[in-house]
Amino acid sequence: MANIIDGKKISQEIKDELKAEVASLAEQGKKCALAVIQVGNDPASSVYVGNKKKACAYIGIQSVSYELPEETSEEELLDLIERLNQDAKVHGILCQLPLPKHIDEDRVIQAISPKKDVDGFHPQNVGALVIGQPGFVSCTPAGIIQLLKRNKIAIAGKHCVVIGRSNIVGKPMALLMLRENATVTVCHSRTQNLKEICREADILIVAIGKPRYIGADYVKEGAVVIDVGIHRNESNKLCGDVAYDEVEPKASYITPVPGGVGPMTIAMLMHNCVEAMKRES
Ligand code: NAD
């Protein structure tokens, strides 16, 4: 039987730590603000944006909303970002993705000042991660490191297999595990012998984006299994990329879906906002 990694509890711990820190910074007259931009009204994006604003309110970060219509031009969005870059009262800028098709996401990501890039997507922050310098790290992989550390799971010297090479999850995850001195293997859609490679993993991090793809035959006895995937199954219940019921008996630690990796993303976004303010003041 595996130990269940409780992302809900750990994310709450982090939010409470941040709340106390924000309160003590407020006593010194320092206030933290996050600009939240949403273009169009994609229902899933509205839920994510709502949850981010709720977390800000809980911690004591001011969230300033910019709800722009679907037909907003790229130039209008870039102008707004430039104004927010210049605004000393705004510490973090979050532009909810995906953006409408007529807007170039890469241009938008690159327009956000790296100092206010709390999502950690700007090439300067990605570069900082590659060469081990301080910067903002993508929230989901940063949250996974917290899950491992706060459960006292050893990383140094372990073989970590990351499945997925997206810019948001797989690649930064691999770099963070390397920074923690793991031996890292990255697998992707062209990997041959995926099952055999996964079976070598002491820590298996799955961000493949396919429901219940990773069964027990991909997992070594006693491995730590981190499931990044989020899907809804036929009966509208949430499930991950890992076949939890099959894998759990083999693993030493495992994240459930929901309640594992998911809640950590917003907690780390809040962490990055507070960090952005501390670096600026
Ligand atoms: P993505 O689709 O961008 O990347 C999936 C990766 O899996 C790709 O790099 C691809 O090469 C690899 N892949 C696809 N098929 C494969 C196969 N058969 N064998 C090996 N590798 C294969 O997805 P993403 O944005 O990295 O997200 C991955 C999952 O995590 C999704 O389910 C997404 O919903 C979820 N997600 C969750 C959070 C969270 O907060 N919990 C955040 C981001 C993403």
Image: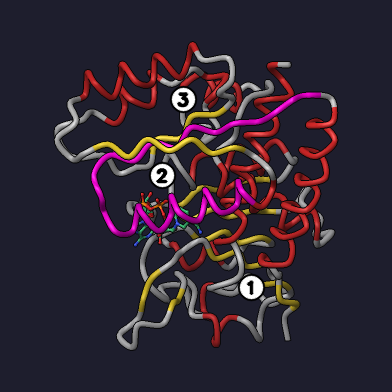
Residue 192 place in picture, x, y as percent? 38, 57
Q: Earlier in the sequence, mark 1 or mark 2?
A: 2
Q: Vertical placement of 24 versus 85: above or below?
A: below
16 relative to 7 in the view: left or right: right
The N terminus lies in which quarter of the figure? bottom right
Residue drawn 58% across and 68% down?
199
Q: Vertical placement of 103 versus 58: above or below?
A: above
Q: Earlier in the sequence, mark 3 or mark 1?
A: 3
Residue 30 place in picture, x, y as percent? 75, 25
CA distance separating discs 2 and 3: 14 Å
Location of residue 261 by image quarter: bottom right
Location of residue 82 by image quarter: top left
Element type at marker 1?
loop
Residues shaded magenta: 29-57
Within 8 Å of ligand 1, the CB of disc 2? yes
Q: Are marks 3 and 1 in contact (CB under 8 Å)?
A: no
Q: Vertical placement of 276 versus 12: above or below?
A: above
Residue type (three-letter) at the residue carrying disc 1 = Lys
82 relative to 39 in the view: left or right: right
| Local crowd size for mark 3, using a 10 Å CA cut-off: few (<14), some (14–19), many (≥20) | many
On the image, numbered disc 1 is attached to which residue? 220
On the image, numbered disc 2 is attached to which residue? 166
Q: Are marks 1 and 2 in contact (CB under 8 Å)?
A: no
Question: Is 36 part of what is drawn in magenta?
Answer: yes
CA distance separating discs 3 and 1: 36 Å
CA distance separating discs 1 and 2: 24 Å
Element type at marker 2?
loop
On the image, numbered disc 3 is attached to which residue? 122
Q: Are marks 2 and 3 in contact (CB under 8 Å)?
A: no
